[in-house]
Image: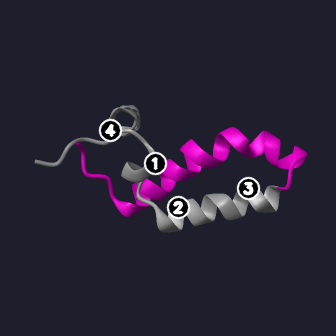
Amino acid sequence: MAHISRTAQMNFYDQALKTPFEGMAESYSGEILENAVEFISANFDPEEIFSEDQLTRWAKENGFVEEK
């Protein structure tokens, strides 16, 4: 699997976890959602949440290349 820097991981969390729920945040408590996203991004690596296929697809779609 391609190596993804910590900055790229954080961008991944922003796009993959936060964005789909932004519309819901107004209907529900945005603060609870923000706290959940912050907790997940601070305590888990992408590999613990997403499958290798999902991570590989995201990396390819976002221009990341595998380091050799």
User: Could you tell me if the residues under marks 1 and 2 are in contact, i.e. CB atoms within 8 Å?
Assistant: no
Looking at the rendered structure, the kind of residue marked 3 is: Leu
Residue 49, disc = 1
For the residue labelled by badge 4, is the local secondary structure a helix, a strand or a loop?
A: helix
Residue 16, disc = none
Q: Residue furthest front?
A: 48
Q: Is residue 8 above or below residue 21?
A: below
Between 50 and 23, the residue placed more toward the observer is 50
Q: Residue furthest left?
A: 68
Point 63% across, 58% down: residue: 37
**Residue that label 2 marks:** 41
Tell me where residue 40 sits by quadrant.
Answer: bottom right
**Residue that label 3 marks:** 33
Q: Which residues are magenta?
A: 1-29
Distance in Å between CA atoms under marks 3 and 2: 12 Å
Point 24% across, 45% down: residue: 2
For the residue labelled by badge 1, is the local secondary structure a helix, a strand or a loop?
A: helix
